[in-house]
Amino acid sequence: MRYPNPMARRETPGSFTDIPAGGWVARYAPPRLQPYLRLARLDRPIGTWLLLWPCWWSLAMASPGWPDAWLLAAFAIGALVMRGAGCAWNDITDRDYDGQVERTRGRPIPSGEISIGQAAAFMVLLALIGLNILLRFNTFAIWIGIMSLAPIVVYPFMKRITWWPQVFLGIAFNWGALLGWAVVRGDLGPAPVLLYLGGIAWTLGYDTIYAHQDKVDDALIGIKSSARRLGAHTRTMLWLFYGAAVVLFGLAGWLAELQPWFLAGLAVAALQLIWQAAWVDIDDPADCLAKFRSNTWFGWLVFLTILLGH
């Protein structure tokens, strides 16, 4: 079924969607561009932040002081376009499933606003912008960046074959923890690897919360997720995932020879994760979305505490 007026479709009483009906895209963007901007999730910046934070953390940890402003900007633009390209790829591969899930059926491809070919062309354009940024780094970092394509490509298919697609999302979304360090120092070591592993554990937590929004529809159409696998045991596992993330982040900072202020700041940042695990209502999609989005604050806290550690 096609929805000629997708914005009206999203506002149907009783429906749930994470697509903002009154966001800046709907208010200010030219109508012909709106489907592409929504395809890239530019009206929902949380995904860009979650992709950017491991990059900025790694840049800050690898730098002797304040990280280079050009590198911060380059990674911000890179995260924006590569998140958009990744979302386009995800929506292309999931187009048949998205049309059967309440939260996603209003997306540009299943709603019929843009074709597969148009989405693919837009994805290539965004990827080329990201490649142009990557080619400005050192050779070692370029190869690290190219290697990130593998988990990006395979991630959308994992929900069909494993209960843990969130692990593969973490592998892809936290690659910047390796790339940022490689850009600054031209190598890798235990500190960025632990930062990367901590990021994967963090992603396991926040994306399990996110996946609880779709667990009813996912069960009907056969999509697997950690939310469905864990069910009522989700809160217990959130403590484990987030606890592992904080420990791994702490070890990364210690190996990077950050000052004790880093650990003090990390303890404060951990309170944000504690709040999520303790208070999330896994049966309330709106609350799951709110807790998921709150990870932007955790990202800021960790970034600032790394700077404090220097």
Image: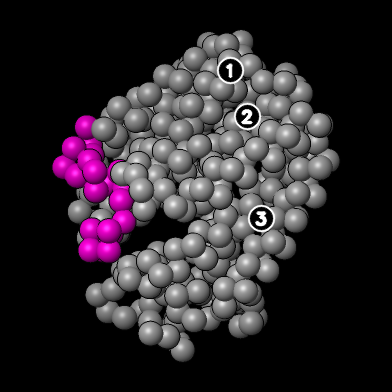
Q: Secondary structure at mark 2?
A: helix
Q: Tell me the residue at 42%/34% (across/down).
A: 202
Quick check: is 223 in the magenta stretch?
yes
Q: Is residue 306 above or below residue 237?
A: above
Residue 137: tell me if it is visible: yes
Q: Amino acid at mark 2?
A: Leu
**Dot 3 crowding, Cα within 10 Å, few <14, some 14–19, many 20+:** many
In the rendered structure, the answer to whether residue 160 lies left or right of residue 283 reads right
- Magenta residue span: 217-236
Nearest the viewer among 61 and 266 is 61
**Residue at the (56%, 22%) spot, across then down:** 193
* Residue drawn at the location 32% of the way across and 68% of the way down: 101
Q: Residues within 10 Å of mark 2 (few under 14, many from 20)?
A: many
Q: Secondary structure at mark 3?
A: helix
Disc marking residue 191? 1
Indicate which disc, 2 or 1, sits on the residue closer to the N terminus: 2
Colouring scheme, one of rainbow, by chain, secondary structure, one colour: one colour
Labelled pair 3, 1 in contact (Cβ < 8 Å): no
Callout 1 amino acid: Ala
Q: Are marks 2 and 1 in contact (CB under 8 Å)?
A: no
**Residue 46: where, in percent of width, then height?**
50, 52
> Dot 3 corresponds to which residue?
81
Of the 4 image quadrants, the one containing the N terminus is bottom left
The CA distance from mark 2 to mark 1 is 9 Å
Q: Is residue 291 visible?
A: no
